[in-house]
Every structure is written in structure tokens, then in C-alpha cells.
Amino acid sequence: MLRALLLLILLTACEGVQGSSGSSAPPRETPVVESTSAPSGAQAVSVTYTQTGGLAGTVETRHFSLDRPRPAGLSRVDIKTALRAASDPALRTLKMTPLPEDQCCDRFSYVVTIRWDDGSSRTYRSLDGVEQPAAFSRLIGHLP
């Protein structure tokens, strides 16, 4: 089961790097926004955070939601703090820094998906060492 999950994540990551044409061009930041008419005060109800890469080639996924089991080692306060950070209105219209062409080496990559109480969601992608807007950096800082 774990092997299948790792394989799926690696294949998904490789698909983003090679694209459908097989080129080695980097994936562009293409946020997923399901609702554009959402109020700016919408509250985050869930955050999914996946970190991959590093020297050991790790894959770690955590789900932050009040209606799901907590990730190991995290308290209810940790979950609420993450959801509060994900509720920052600046995240809804944030323009992420494009990812560099050179995505090799032992960098960590991050995929964060936020779902808000109005039913909309957005997925952000970043790479270790890429300076992103402050709202995204604050969010990552609250996802232990």
C-alpha cells in the first residue's frame, strides 16, 4: 500500500515536470480555484500539505481539519492554528512565484491545498529555496 502511494506521488510529480508533450519545461503555477465569487472572509475548513524530496527522498502528507483525525503528534490547537493561517484572505488571490527550471537535487517540494467553507479550493505548489509571498510563507510556518 505504501509503495503504491509513493509510486503515485512520484508519477504525479514527474507528470508535472515533463508535461503532456514530454518536454522538460517546468510546471507553471496554475492555481485551482473552484469558486471566484467567494466572500473574502471565507474560513478554511481543511488544509492538505504534502512535502516530498530532501536527501532521504521523503514523502509526508498531513491533513488539517477539525472533522478528520489529527496527524500524529499534533494537538487540536495545532489544527486550529493551521486553519486560521489558511483563512488569511490574501491566500485567495495570491500570485505565487514561478518555479525554476532546475528542480533537481535534494530540494523539498510542497503542495498545499486549502478548502474554504464556501466550497472553493486552491492548490499551491512551491519548492524549497523559492521565495514566495509572505502569506504563503506564514501558512507553511504553521503546518508542522
Image (cartoon, rainbow, N blue to C red):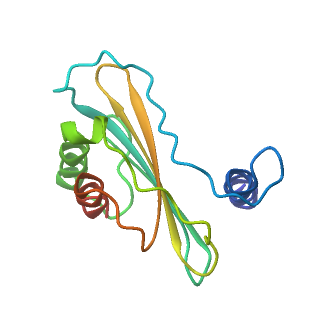
The foreground one among 134 and 11 is 134
Query: Left or right: where does residue 97 sit relative to residue 73?
Result: right
Farthest top residue in view: 37
What residue appears at the point 79 percent right and 43 percent down from the top-left corner? 20
What residue appears at the point 83 percent right and 52 percent down from the top-left corner? 22
- From the top left corner, tell me how far across and down residue 55 is, in percent: 58, 84
Q: With respect to residue 95, does 141 lie above or below?
A: below
Quarter location, residue 141 = bottom left
How many marks do you count on the picture? 0
- From the top left corner, tell me how far across and down residue 137 is, in percent: 28, 60
Q: Can residue 17 be seen in this view?
A: yes
- From the top left corner, tell me how far across and down residue 110 is, in percent: 48, 60
Q: Can residue 66 be seen in this view?
A: no
Farthest bottom residue in view: 55
The foreground one among 25 and 137 is 25
- From the top left corner, tell me how far across and down residue 11 is, in percent: 75, 55
Say which quadrant the C terminus sits in. bottom left
Query: Left or right: where does residue 113 sit relative to residue 38?
Result: right
The foreground one among 125 and 25 is 25
Query: Left or right: where does residue 123 sit relative to residue 115?
Result: right
Say which quadrant the N terminus sits in. bottom right
What residue appears at the point 19 percent right and 46 percent down from the top-left corner? 80
